[in-house]
Amino acid sequence: MFYDKGNYYDFTSLVKELETPGTLFDSKEYAFEFKKVEKPYQSYQGLNVRLRYFLRATITRNYSGSIVKEEDFLVQLLEAEPEINNSIKMEVGIEDCLHIEFEYEKQKYHLEDIIIGKIYFLLVRIKIKHMELAVIRRESAGSGPNLYNESETLTKFEIMDGAPVKGECVPVRLFLKGIPSELTPTYRNVNNKFSVKYYLNLVLVDEEDRRYFKQQEIHMWRKKLG
């Protein structure tokens, strides 16, 4: 946890002794193997937290301290296609001024998926200048007084320019593979330390630069190959 750099939290740890006490005079190789190691979480590098897997080799000496070498490796957990993946349908608006209905084809997306949807204007009595859609990642780390929530906009693009009229339908097509920032799966309460969630943020801007927005949480997952 970056706000608490003095403390590290181990969720798994295995140790093997490769050599008994003695004297080492020449170069030597040591074979080792960790069989069927459970790796319950995916590697993650975030704004306030980092989840690492690494190998650490330690030579303990009676003088000048120990020699320690660490080598990181990455873990990715692959998931099968969700059996249930319902569409998202919501109506939002401002009384007597604006009423829109938006629909996305599904709620769960793999990291190279395409977000497809439609936005319907049922009532328009304000002068809209443009409309944009953003993908937001929100990281929650820690708990209680040490709870940190950080949001970052991964991509944002304009899907409408100008004032719509009642009955207008605006299509949405967003390619997740083209997002410059690296996407991760959704993480929920990893080791009781942090969570990562994704949101679609729909924003309308009127001619007086007032902003009207609606967020919808989506689930991200890493697809199995083949």
Image (tube, grey):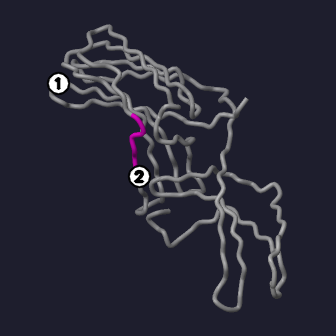
Amino acid type of the residue tagged 2 in the rendering = Asn
Instruction: Residue at 80%, 76% (x, y): give it.
Output: 27
Give whichever of discs 2 and 1 has the lower sequence position: 2
Query: Relative to the observer, which residue lies in front, 34 or 83?
Result: 34
Circle 1: is it few (<14), some (14-19), or many (20+) Cα within 10 Å?
few
Amino acid type of the residue tagged 1 in the rendering = Glu
Magenta stretch: includes residue 11: no
Is residue 12 depicted above or below 168 in this figure?
Answer: below
Is residue 177 depicted above or below 124 in this figure?
Answer: below
Residue 193 falls in image quadrant? bottom right
What is the x, y in percent for residue 85? 59, 25
Q: Secondary structure at mark 1?
A: loop
Instruction: Residue at 46%, 38% (x, y): give it.
Output: 180
Q: Secondary structure at mark 2?
A: strand
The outermost residue toward the bottom is 63
User: How far is the residue under mark 2 from the one under mark 1?
Assistant: 32 Å
What is the x, y in percent for residue 191? 60, 56
Instruction: Residue at 33%, 18% (x, y): give it.
Output: 100
Q: Which residues are magenta?
A: 150-155
Q: Which mark, residue 149?
A: 2
What is the x, y in percent for residue 161? 27, 19
The outermost residue toward the top is 167
Point out the frontmost of discs 2 and 1: 1
Residue 22 falls in image quadrant? bottom right
- Give the labeled residue for mark 1: 207
Is residue 223 depicted above or below 23 in this figure?
Answer: above
SS majority, magenta: strand
Magenta stretch: includes residue 153: yes
What is the x, y in percent for residue 35? 83, 57
Q: Is residue 29 left or right of residue 191?
A: right
